[in-house]
Image (cartoon, rainbow, N blue to C red):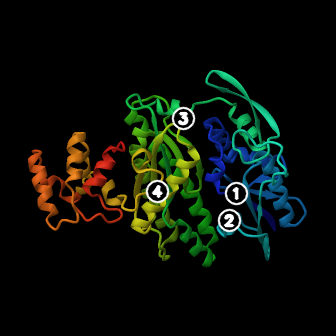
């Protein structure tokens, strides 16, 4: 029987965002690509799995060496640690005589989540953490402020070269990125109309993990392998669709999307603020269509709670707002979007840090799957509302009194006073429950670069 192994980076979002400088974020993203991790594994004598899924942050390999699975898993972890010193990793292994069966079993082991080293029959999984700091620490890294500084790098900042003391991980990031590349300010500047804000977008499939758990319980490991490949392809196609939509909306020749994380169905990107809605809607539409097709193809009549849909959380902030904060907030917004629809359909929500602060408002509206359709009544109302002048929108929002039993009559009167037809916006007049678009939420959406 052949020994198959899978290595993956845990808490990938936290790992990538531990440094504030974009060049170092890009260095981490590059180091986590499938190609880079496979090169590290190959240097230790591991071969690529013949049916491996090309997903960043995860590799599937084969070992022809004699020895226990746990020993080979540890050896693979050591090889990867040289490439990504600061990452938490898990390595799973299984002995099998079928490529797809092994790939499915490895995916099942990976889905077990964090835990201690375990060996179950001919398979197992280990967790591996970065080396702890030696105490007392002589000096912390100037970039991440997390680990001990062990080297120095030269960084160009405000036209001056600065020498920084950095940890092994930040040193690696700087080397991989070349210490150069586009800054957050330069990314925002691709929008010639309002080039000082960015959007951080976190995207994830709804209840896809439950599909893998069900398939694991049923022993359908080949189904897991095939579905994993289709999910990876759907993410690639959705990113392409989002990039096209963002570029067309901004009218720029350069790629306005920086993908920080593309691991499995998790995606974390930065785009100029005005491109956020075109990118996100194109991504969600494409990924939802493709994932539903994949589920239909591979699961047949298997009962699953997954709708095959995708949700997203968007955070708008100034270019100098800490990326670690926006990425975590984007994850919180994503969870809000999922919770409002209970993961049963595609959904998108947002936070504008300048307006909303550093938390998700409890009554924040959620754009549901039906409103991704251009003919949707609510979408039409949101578009009409966004086209109004800023003062008109504010007046309509201020006249919204949900506690007043006659609030619709009050709303009608204000619309008529402003020369508007009340029926155009009737779908916005609701009690302020979580996820519902009231006039207040519609006004906040319009201020957050909403675009049809």
**Secondary element type, mark 4:** helix
Please determine whether, in this image, residue 440 is positioned above or below residue 164. below
| Residue count near mark 4 (Cα–Cα under 10 Å), binned few <14, some 14–19, many ≥20 | many
User: Circles 1 and 4: CB distance less than 8 Å?
Assistant: no
Q: CA distance from mark 3 to mark 1?
A: 28 Å
- Closer-to-camera residue (162/36): 162
Residue 178 percent across, percent down from the top left: 70, 31
Q: CA distance from mark 1 to mark 4?
A: 25 Å
Marker disc for residue 110? 2
User: Looking at the image, is mark 1 or mark 4 earlier in the sequence?
Assistant: 1
Marker disc for residue 333? 4
Which of the image's four quarters has the C terminus?
A: top left
Q: Which residue is mark 3?
A: 184
User: Circles 4 and 3: CB distance less than 8 Å?
Assistant: no
Q: Which residue is mark 1?
A: 8
| Residue count near mark 1 (Cα–Cα under 10 Å), binned few <14, some 14–19, many ≥20 | many
């Amino acid at each position: 029987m052949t020994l198959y192994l899978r290595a993956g980076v845990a808490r990938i979002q936290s790992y990538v965002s531990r440094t504030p400088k974009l060049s170092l974020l890009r260095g981490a993203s590059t180091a986590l690509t499938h190609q880079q991790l496979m090169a590290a594994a190959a240097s230790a004598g591991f071969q690529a799995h013949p049916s491996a899924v090309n997903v960043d942050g995860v590799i599937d390999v084969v070992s022809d060496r004699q020895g226990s699975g746990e020993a080979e898993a540890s050896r693979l972890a050591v090889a990867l640690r040289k490439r990504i010193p600061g990452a938490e990793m898990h390595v799973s292994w299984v002995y099998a005589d079928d490529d797809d069966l092994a790939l499915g079993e490895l995916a099942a082991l990976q889905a077990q989540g964090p835990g201690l080293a375990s060996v179950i029959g001919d398979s197992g999984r280990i967790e591996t953490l970065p080396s702890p700091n030696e105490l007392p620490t002589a000096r912390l890294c100037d970039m991440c402020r997390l680990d001990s500084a062990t080297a120095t790098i030269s960084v160009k900042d405000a036209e001056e070269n600065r020498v920084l003391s950095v940890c092994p991980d930040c040193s690696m990031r700087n080397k991989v990125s070349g210490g150069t590349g586009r800054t957050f300010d330069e990314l925002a500047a691709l929008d010639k109309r309002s080039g000082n804000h960015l959007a951080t977008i976190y995207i994830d499939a709804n209840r896809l993990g439950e599909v893998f758990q069900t398939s694991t319980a049923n022993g359908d490991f080949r189904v897991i392998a095939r579905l994993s490949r289709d999910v990876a392809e759907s993410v690639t196609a959705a990113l392409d669709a989002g990039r096209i939509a963002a570029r067309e909306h901004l009218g720029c020749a350069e790629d306005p999307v920086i993908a920080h994380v593309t691991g499995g169905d998790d995606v974390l990107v930065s785009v100029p603020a005005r491109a956020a809605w075109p990118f996100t809607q194109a991504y969600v539409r494409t990924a939802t269509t493709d994932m539903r097709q994949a589920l239909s193809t591979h699961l047949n009549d298997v009962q699953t709670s997954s709708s095959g849909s995708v949700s997203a959380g968007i955070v708008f902030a100034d270019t100098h707002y800490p990326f670690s904060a926006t990425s975590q907030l984007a994850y919180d917004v994503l969870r809000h979007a999922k919770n409002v629809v209970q993961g049963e359909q595609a959904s998108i929500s947002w936070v504008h840090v300048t307006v909303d602060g550093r938390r998700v408002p409890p009554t924040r509206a959620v754009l549901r799957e039906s409103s991704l359709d251009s003919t949707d009544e609510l979408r039409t109302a949101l578009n009409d509302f966004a086209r109004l002048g800023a003062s008109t929108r504010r007046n309509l929002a201020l006249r919204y009194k949900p506690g007043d039993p006659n609030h619709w009559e009050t709303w009608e009167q204000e619309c008529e006073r402003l020369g508007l037809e009340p029926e155009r916006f009737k779908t916005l007049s609701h009690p302020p429950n979580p996820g519902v678009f009231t006039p207040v939420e519609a006004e906040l959406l319009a201020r957050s670069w909403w675009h049809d």
